[in-house]
Amino acid sequence: MSNLLKLEAFQTRINQFLSDKLDTLVVNDEKLLAAMRYGLLIGGKRMRPYLAYTVGEALNVELSDIDGVAAALECIHAYSLLHDDLPAMDDDDLRRGQPTCHKKFDEATAILAGDSLQTLAFDILANHTFTAKVEAKKIVLIQLLVKASGYEGMCGGQALDLSATDKSISLSELEHLHSLKTGALLEASVSMAAECATDLTKEDKEQLTAFARNVGLAYQVRDDIIDITSSEEELGKPAGSDLAANKSTYPSLLGLDSAQQKADDLYQSALQALSTLPYNTQSLANFATFIVQRNG
């Protein structure tokens, strides 16, 4: 991940912000707070915060404004993983090379920790100290995250994913599923950061959205590929989990080579969208490159 400029700096920044936020919470139940901290801070590449910071920097947005956006996005992502790992869903024992939250604690605590992290995301957005121009857009930021994370986005995609288990679905159905389950929150990482910019044209927003949509799908295609080509050590979770769960994936529908070609085509479309923008978008191009080349 060496081509991702400022990755370590942005990881450190968001980890400190999130840790500080947890430290401000009144301790009502020590076990629940420990599970929230475990789910939020134990590892993770922080790709959604990194994407938000990178977009913000390209558009000359104050990083202090992006802090609130990035933290809210990561809380939503973390909560989704806690619930995704539960026996009622993917039933995974490992996440990021560590026991999943329900294994470390228990199922009820993992559910409540996920619920608490979800609401913490909106607490952060509602109470973050934004600059004046972004403060006026706070409701829009909340609306974008609601759409990306709820029924119209991530949760809706997860429901489609569960209903597609042990079934054969079409390529268009698979793309729709993943545009919601995975793509919506990555797209929100871009659109929420872009909303913090003061002079972005409608056309520029549309091109950034196109970039995010293509990167989001490329992320999932590559995820399906490495699920069968990478080791458990590289993934930090059991390899071949989609195959074991009898889920439709891009490799199962297209074949491995064609699935990689699909990821490459989406990558080229993402770069094409960036090429129209009057900003320095090299870091965003590097992010897209990382997405289609990663092994874990």
Image: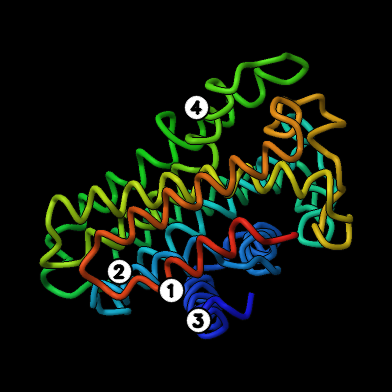
Which label number is shown at residue 151? none
Question: How far across and down, in percent of the image, does residue 45 sit?
Answer: 62, 67
Q: Secondary structure at mark 1?
A: helix
- Is 244 positioned to the left or the right of 261 in the image? right
Q: Find the distance from the CA under tag 3 to the CA under tag 4.
A: 31 Å
For the N terminus, the image quarter is bottom right
Q: CA distance from mark 1 to mark 3?
A: 6 Å
Asked whether the residues under the numbered discs 1 and 3 touch, taking CB atoms below 8 Å apart as contact, a structural biologist would say: yes
Residue at the location (49% across, 27% down)? 176
Mark 3 / mark 4, whichever is N-terminal: 3
**Colouring convention used in this rendered image of the protein:** rainbow
Query: Disc 1 or 3, which lies upstream in sequence?
Result: 3
Q: Residues within 10 Å of mark 2 (few under 14, many from 20)?
A: some
Q: Position of residue 47 (x, y in %)?
A: 54, 63
**Disc 2, SS:** loop
- Which amino acid, by three-letter code, is at mark 3? Leu
The disc at residue 176 is 4
> Label 3, on which residue?
5
